[in-house]
Image (spheres, rainbow, N blue to C red):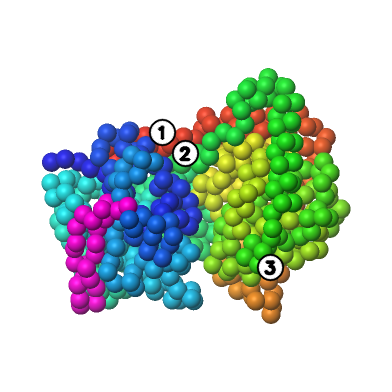
Amino acid sequence: MSVKLVFVTYETPFAPCGGIAAVMGRLPGYVQKASGLDTIVITPFHYKIEKTSSLDNKIKLMANIDVPFDNENVPVEVYRYNDNRYQWAWHFLKPVDSRFFAGRRHPYDVGETQGEVSRNLLRDSLFFGATVARILDSTDQTAHWKVLIQDWEAATTALALAIQGKDHELYLTLHNSYDSGVTNADLSQVGIDPASCPGETVLQRALPLVERPVFTVSSQFALDLTEDPLQAEVMAPHLKDILKPRLLGVDNGLFASLAINEGILAEMVRGNFAPVQKWKNTRKKEALKSLDEFPPSKEKPIWGDLKRFGRDDSPWFVMAGRDDPRQKGYDIAASGITEFLEKGGEARFLFFPIPGDEGLDGLSFLKKMSERFSESVLVLPFLFQEGFFATLQGATYGVMPSLYEPFGMANEFYLNGTVGIGRATGGIVQQIVPLRSASSFTRAVQVRSERWHTASATPTGILFRERDNIGSTVDDWRGINAAEYDIKGRGLDRVEQRKRYPLFRSMAHELMLSIIDAVRVYRDTPELYYRMLAEGINHIRHSFSWERAARGYVRHIVG
């Protein structure tokens, strides 16, 4: 019997939303090479998403199968897609019923209200799992499948396979702690026997069915899932005891290539910083040129005043990525930066938020800040393809004030020639070696960073963390996670509403202190800044790779 690998994932580079898409564009090929096993990826055909629908003329029909749903059989077309960019085949599942996999902006955008999204996403995920279970046998009936399931949306595959009696091995990777309640009636609707997988949520039902190591995407996040108050007490308290003895962090590889010339990096290591200063100044000028030439529109506005925006030698701080009010931390950044600027701090801040489910309205607090501090703050709330990388590479610091972070993009900062500032959580702690002389290097930072970095380790950036002795921490996290603010301008915005929580105020204040630290380092000891950058690049390149990640998985999956 042949042994084969299959990644089962709801999100891919053809239907991206978060980090899973980036991982799925890299990891399968490295695992295939490390294991020597044939590998495929199975995913829904999210037909409303342009990157998916553009494949219509490139995919090849492999099979037609029927999948039960609501006492009927729904025909599903199974397509194969090969792409020279990838060393494995993609298998897309395309139901003829247009209710399924109808996300618009991203795979999880399947409703107008949160309740509608939750119901539709659960329905689609269960149908996805039921379909995958049937696909595994029809694709190769002689194969012994090692099934690598990504997050709860794909963990439904384990529920569907529970009564088939097949000798498939199931492995679960958690990219976050999201889960979904599921009733016996929900399972029966897609032909899954509830008795074969008892529990109240998808993950509670799936965890007894998967192999013992439950993977996650960084070693620190494996700890956070059962130790961090947000994860363990608010987001997934029902999983804490089940996961604690089983979690294994396998650090992701890198999501960018080195932008700095190797010769410039070699000069930096030798202590000659003039070439990298010249390179960054050139990129900064190119960024400003791109900003000046860009024609803003209603869909792609520029918040702030480009003419008034300071163009002196003040350090630039950049924050970017899709807005997620329960994870990303744009509100912490806005609050901490406001405090910094109110105190007379001199620096420039450039935000590149990609609007999330709350749209542009949800980012109104950034617009308010840019209007109040027009000399210091610019916000481009869209994908600024014309000048983002020039801005990042010309910037002094990249900022990650994440509420939680499974792996994190600090590696992308360094590879683009920018020093990282981050909240000490998840993979950020592993990617940034903190400057211990900074005022933001508190006891809360120390106890987390010392798991990964010795006291004598050369610093690469700045970590901050709120105080650990806040009595209302768990209640504050519940309030923050509830996201009960007004995005239409009729009440308190995200920052105004969350500032009532001591936890939030402490996070924002510690970020403010880290910005003061960062400005001081850049202005008073530029040689320290460039040493941190050089060490940061080398730390990232030496500590994280997809080859290493693949070996981490294969060691436990193949032996």
Q: Which residues are magenta?
A: 58-80
Quarter of the image for residue 452 reads: top right
- Could you tell me which residue is drawn at 29 percent across and 72 percent down? 97
Q: In which quadrant is the N terminus drawn?
A: top left
| Residue designated by label 1 | 547
| Residue 533 higher or lower than 137, as above or below | above
Residue 91 appears in the picture as rendered: no
In front: 213, or 321?
321
| Residue designated by label 2 | 253
Q: Are marks 2 and 1 in contact (CB under 8 Å)?
A: yes
| Residue designated by label 3 | 364
| Secondary structure under the numbered disc 1 in the rendered image | helix
Residue 256 appears in the picture as rendered: yes
In front: 367, or 388?
388
Nearest to N terminus: mark 2 or mark 1: 2
Nearest to N terminus: mark 2 or mark 3: 2
| Secondary structure under the numbered disc 2 in the rendered image | loop
In the rendering, at what x and y percent does residue 442 appear? Answer: 70, 45
Mark 2–mark 1 Cα distance, whole angstroms, equals: 8 Å
In the rendering, at what x and y percent does residue 36 appear? Answer: 27, 33
**What amino acid type is highlighted by mark number 2?**
Gly
Mark 2–mark 3 Cα distance, whole angstroms, equals: 34 Å
Q: Relative to residue 542, is residue 301 drawn left or right? A: right
